[in-house]
């Protein structure tokens, strides 16, 4: 028998041992000490129920069996903990070396003139303010910091986490710009819906919430910016030039606010309660409604309690760094709201607010932190996730004000929603 065959057999035996040992020893431990087995095996801190076998769906997929087994692997919790500790130790040393080597060869890109075609209009509202803020933060982002991605999550500067997938990195690098034909298609949909709303006496607003990476870019790693005239900037200008509908992208509001407060979560992809209030005030500006500085309503700080990106990475709760805080906001405490449920996919509220109109907001998860404010200012509100639009057709037809919201990385979903609203109002 050759040395190669012996080596291969040894590796196979080691591999089989790694697979079989947890089950054999785990079964033995479970017989003699069930409580100890639970402690080292069950990941209770994942805040979810253990997977169950979907017997009715076995003919289509065996994924539920795989998930069932994975959740019940003996020493699951201990193995996860050991892996994370080992991986973090290696990753820390590697990042130090990678940062040092990268810094030796990295040269910050020079500022380039953005080609805006025949128009001299700003790329986004308040662009001059945005440029000033970016220049002030330049010393932070000029330093080289390598890109590290784990389970579709970017590990940024100072421990900040960002989405890598879901179109976020493409928006940040400018690799997903729209063609003229695509923007024309979007503009035509907006104009069609606006004509219908005009005929029915309804107000219409299209609202794109900025990606976290666009507001807290100073914590993003060093990556190539392929096109500094990004997708949303081009789309904002095109819609503004070719449509009468207010098209909101409140990046200036959030950037200015971020100089005073933290407006997005450190370990989550969404804006926090105060960031959402700045976003709501930007909507009120477009509506011509009066409002006061959001800082007026700040009372205290609290644990942010939003760690979605850690969950994406599969990290148990007791391994999460709980150092993110947000401002407590007590908005217009004198106003009473009935029926508010921020967890509901479809929510109806009434209040004694200042605006006696029926508001219907259709959007994504960024809508959630906007609800407590909108529901206090409008006397009658319908809030719905866009996947539940069918359930709110009567509310759309009866609404005085329609707001269609989507986060920047999912801007195309807003235009898909626009078409569905067109279909609803034409029924």
Image (tube, helix red, strand yellow):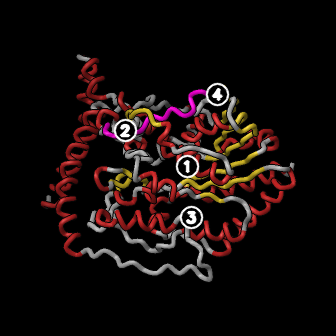
Q: Position of residue 147 (x, y in %)?
A: 32, 62
Could you tell which of marks 1 and 4 lies nearer the N-terminus? 1
Pointer 3 residue: 125
- In this view, 297 is above or below 99: above
Q: Which mark is residue 337?
A: 4
Of labels 2 and 3, the one closer to you: 3
- Residue 24 in magenta stretch: no
Q: Position of residue 296 (x, y in %)?
A: 49, 39
**Residue found 62% across the figure and 70% down from its top:** 237
Q: Secondary structure at mark 1?
A: helix
- In this view, 35 is above or below 201: above
Pointer 2 residue: 325
Q: Which residues are magenta?
A: 322-336
Which image quarter holds the N terminus?
A: bottom left
**Cα–Cα span, label 4 and label 2:** 26 Å
For residue 157, which quarter of the picture? bottom left
Residue 48 as seen in the image, left or right of residue 413: left
Residue 86 visible in rendering: yes
Residue 387 as seen in the image, left or right of residue 427: left
Pointer 1 residue: 279
Q: Secondary structure at mark 4?
A: strand
- Residue 330 in magenta stretch: yes
Q: Secondary structure at mark 2?
A: strand
Residue 365 visible in rendering: no
């Amino acid at each position: 028998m050759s040395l190669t065959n012996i080596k291969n057999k040894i590796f196979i035996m080691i591999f089989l041992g790694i697979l079989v040992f947890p089950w054999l020893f785990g079964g033995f431990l479970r017989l003699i000490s069930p409580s100890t087995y639970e402690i080292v095996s069950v990941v209770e801190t994942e805040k979810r129920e253990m997977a169950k076998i979907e017997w009715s769906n076995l003919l289509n997929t065996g994924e539920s069996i795989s998930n069932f087994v994975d959740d019940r692997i003996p020493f699951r919790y201990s193995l996860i903990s050991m892996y994370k500790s080992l991986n973090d130790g290696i990753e820390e040393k590697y990042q130090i070396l990678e940062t040092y080597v990268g810094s030796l060869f990295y040269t910050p890109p020079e500022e380039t003139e953005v080609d805006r075609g025949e128009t001299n209009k700003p790329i986004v509202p308040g662009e001059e303010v945005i440029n000033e803020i970016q220049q002030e933060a330049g010393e932070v982002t000029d330093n080289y910091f390598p890109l590290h991605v784990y389970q579709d999550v970017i590990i940024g500067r100072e421990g900040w986490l960002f989405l890598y997938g879901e179109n976020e990195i493409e928006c940040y690098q400018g690799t997903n710009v729209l063609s003229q034909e695509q923007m024309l298609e979007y503009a035509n949909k907006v104009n069609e819906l606006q004509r219908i709303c005009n005929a029915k006496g309804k107000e219409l607003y299209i609202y794109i919430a900025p990606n976290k990476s666009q507001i807290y870019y100073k914590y993003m790693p060093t990556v190539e910016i392929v096109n500094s005239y990004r997708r949303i900037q081009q789309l904002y200008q095109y819609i503004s030039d070719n449509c009468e509908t207010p098209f909101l992208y409140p990046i200036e509001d959030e950037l200015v606010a971020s100089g005073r407060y933290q407006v997005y979560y450190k370990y989550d992809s969404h804006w926090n309660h105060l960031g959402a209030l700045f976003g709501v005030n930007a909507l009120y500006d477009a509506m011509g409604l009066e409002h006061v500085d959001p800082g007026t309503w700040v009372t205290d700080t609290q644990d942010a309690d939003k760690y979605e990106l850690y969950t994406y990475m599969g990290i148990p709760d007791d391994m999460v760094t709980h150092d993110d805080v947000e401002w407590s906001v007590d908005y217009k405490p004198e106003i009473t709201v009935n029926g508010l449920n921020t967890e509901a996919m479809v929510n109806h509220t009434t209040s004694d607010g200042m605006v006696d109109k029926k508001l219907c907001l259709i959007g994504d998860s960024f809508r959630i932190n906007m609800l407590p404010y909108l529901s206090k200012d409008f006397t009658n509100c319908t809030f719905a996730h866009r996947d539940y639009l069918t359930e709110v057709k009567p509310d759309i037809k009866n609404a005085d004000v329609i707001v269609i919201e989507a986060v920047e990385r999912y801007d195309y979903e807003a235009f898909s929603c626009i078409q569905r609203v067109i279909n609803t109002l034409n029924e």
